[in-house]
Image: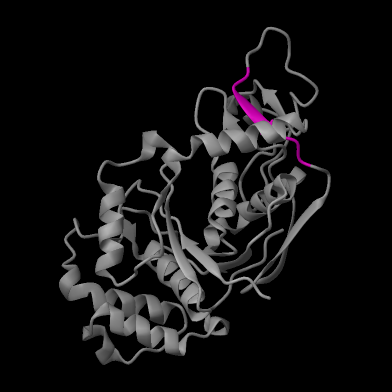
Amino acid sequence: MTAPVVGRFAPSPTGPLHLGSLVAAVGSWLFARSAGGLWLLRMEDLDAARVVTGCADDILWTLEALGLTWDGEVVYQSRRAEAYKQAFEGLLRKGLIYPCCCSRAEIATSSSAPHLETGEIPYPGTCRNGMPAGREARSYRLFVADEWVSFEDDLLGEQSQFLRSVCGDFIVKRADGPFAYHLAVVVDDAYSGVNQVVRGADLILSTPRQVYLYSLLGKPQPAYAHLPLVTGPGGGKLSKRDNAVSLTSTHDLCKEAGRLIHFALSFLGLTPPAELAMYPPSELLSWGLSHFLPTAISTVTKIH
């Protein structure tokens, strides 16, 4: 038997939703609901220093006002430290993690050139065989094998990345801070039974790290689909300050909800009649479900 689809939307409460995050929410909702599946919500508030007070509640209220209702309780990463600790300690016991004393400045002055696509300087492995005497750990890194990591994207086809040349051994925990995003998101998706991850294409370059962690943790890997990005006038990615979609912004969602959902559906390759923009968002989403066709969504370049 095929397992029921479990999708999710996982915003960060570092600012209000914007048009790009709205498209990701609608896209993931359509993928999950069109398969008769669940749509979960997770608040990625792991980095407390970047969280804006009140944003989490505003995001929840905004999604509800736009007709995007979720299943079950909202998961908050800030309350999941023990689960991340258990996964971290399991990897540590297997000898897959090591302490690292290198600062960003030290890595930046290494001989490695930045990766052409990500702009990252791959970690050169300075502490792989032990830290220099007298130094203290600044982070804990995951040993990355000398191999390609591949996954199938439902929109973009097969994607492959050689992690050693892109990022090298990557951080899973700061010595004096929280666990890293890549570890947390894998642990959380496995915990919630998520088997479908639909999100923006800006995250595709980091997906192989999560795929690699799934294999090391012995967890089933979800299916992926990376949506095209909504860009600003100059072609750059929208920030949370651009085109905010929020109950606390100047938007009157009572009047604009239909127009916003109409925009998201149109961006995802659907052609809702213009007059539907004046209808309640629930009616637009219902129309979107009955007409949803993933193959109509435009695609982006493969990763390397």
Q: Which quadrant holds residue 61? A: bottom left
Q: Is residue 230 visible?
A: no
Position of 271 with respect to 122 (left or right) is: left
From the viewer's side, name the closer residue of 191 and 259.
Answer: 191
**Which residue shows up at 58% across the image and 46% down it?**
187
Q: Is residue 152 above or below residue 275?
A: above
Residue farthest along the top direction in this orientation: 134
Residue farthest along the front direction in this orientation: 1
Residue 84 colored magenta? no
Residue 266 screen position, x and y as percent: 40, 82
**Which residue shows up at 59% across the image and 70% down it?**
300
Q: Is residue 289 above or below residue 67?
A: below
Which range of residues does the magenta coloring cover?
137-144
**Which residue shows up at 80% across the image and 23% down it?**
129
**Which residue shows up at 81% across the image and 42% down it?**
145
Q: Is residue 136 above or below residue 16?
A: above
Report the quarter where the C terminus lies. bottom right
Q: Which quadrant holds residue 270? A: bottom left
Position of 144 with respect to 58 (left or right) is: right
Q: Is residue 218 visible?
A: yes
Residue 140 colored magenta? yes
Residue 172 screen position, x and y as percent: 61, 36
Residue 75 screen position, x and y as percent: 42, 50
From the viewer's side, name the closer residue of 41 and 177.
Answer: 41
Position of 278 with respect to 116 (left or right) is: left
From the viewer's side, name the closer residue of 179 and 226.
Answer: 179
